[in-house]
Image (spheres, grey):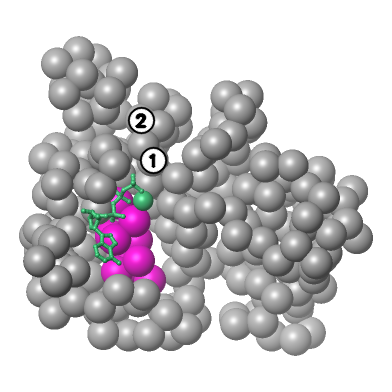
Amino acid sequence: MLQVDGLSVRYGPVQALRGVSFTAEDGVITTVLGANGAGKTTLLRTLSGLVRTHEGTATFDGEPLIGKDPETIARMGIAHVPEGRGVIAELTVDEHLRLGTLSRVPRSERRTAIEDVYGLFPPLESRRHRHAATLSGGERQMLVIARALVSRPRLLLLDEPSLGLAPIVTAQTMATIRQLTSREGIGAVLVEQNARSALSVADWAVVLNLGQVVLADRPERLTADADLRHHYLGF
Ligand SMILES: Nc1ncnc2c1ncn2[C@@H]1O[C@H](COP(=O)(O)OP(=O)(O)OP(=O)(O)O)[C@@H](O)[C@H]1O
Ligand SMILES: [Mg+2]
């Protein structure tokens, strides 16, 4: 579904990505792991059209992504959930979801799309008229994922959804991502510094180091290799 080939990005003198290649499929969680500054956010921002590059290719169902603007890429069915759980404090949960439907969902189907997403996130449904400012960290993470899902994407790009969440809330978030991919058939590229929890749900793992793919393997293989874990994953 997503095919990335030889992607390189530089910010002036800083080479953030060097010839990155990998694929991500429908119904599968592909986790991209790596330390601070490895290039994980740059990779997601390049795939969603926020960072420009001339080097390498990325296609979604055969259609090129590089060179397209973020709105076009979102309309193709790729939803980016950025780092930091950005919500608009004075909008309610329901208003966030209504905004999420605008790009891709026909007007007559918007309410249904929102109610479908509430079905996946009961805690959001019970808070639908609350302002985002009143939500906990875990609920905000749910809301930004829900806002992406309400556009009925085929591929979710998730940037460090576990950052700053308590372990139990992280586990719930990972379980939700697992459920979305297995049950709804959505593909996910899950970027994480928290390698242990990402590997616990992923189907395939790609490790970035200084902008380069140093390893791509099944999660069990990474978890089982103590040297690798110490060297690249920090646990
Ligand atoms: N806008 C920018 N301008 C210049 N350099 C940047 C910019 N954004 C990122 N970089 C640099 O590019 C490299 C990759 O950064 P990136 O944010 O993609 O890494 P990351 O893996 O997401 O890190 P983190 O785990 O801290 O979120 C780093 O060296 C970073 O300092
Ligand atoms: Mg980052």
Q: Quadrant of residue 17?
A: bottom left
Please give the name of the residue rendered at 16% of the width and 42% of the height, measured from the top-left corner.
209
Nearest the viewer among 183 and 23 is: 23
* Whole-percent x, y for residue 204 in the image: 30, 39
Task: Give the quarter of the figure containing the C terminus.
Answer: top left
Q: Quadrant of residue 196?
A: top left
The residue tagged 2 is 195
* Whole-percent x, y for residue 51 in the image: 30, 73
Nearest the viewer among 65 and 45 is: 45
The quarter of the image that holds ligand 1 is bottom left
> Could one spot residue 40 in this view of the protein?
yes
Q: Is mark 1 within 8 Å of ligand 1?
A: no
Give the residue type that dot 2 points to.
Ala
Q: Is residue 57 above or below residue 210?
A: below
Please give the name of the residue rendered at 21% of the width and 39% of the height, measured from the top-left corner.
207
* Whole-percent x, y for residue 38 in the image: 22, 46
Q: Is residue 23 above or below residue 106?
A: above
Q: Secondary structure at mark 1?
A: strand
Which residue range is magenta in the image?
Answer: 40-48
Give the residue type that dot 1 points to.
Glu
Mark carried by residue 192:
1
Position of 20 with respect to 99 (left or right) is left
Q: Is residue 30 above or below residue 231?
A: below
Q: Secondary structure at mark 2?
A: helix
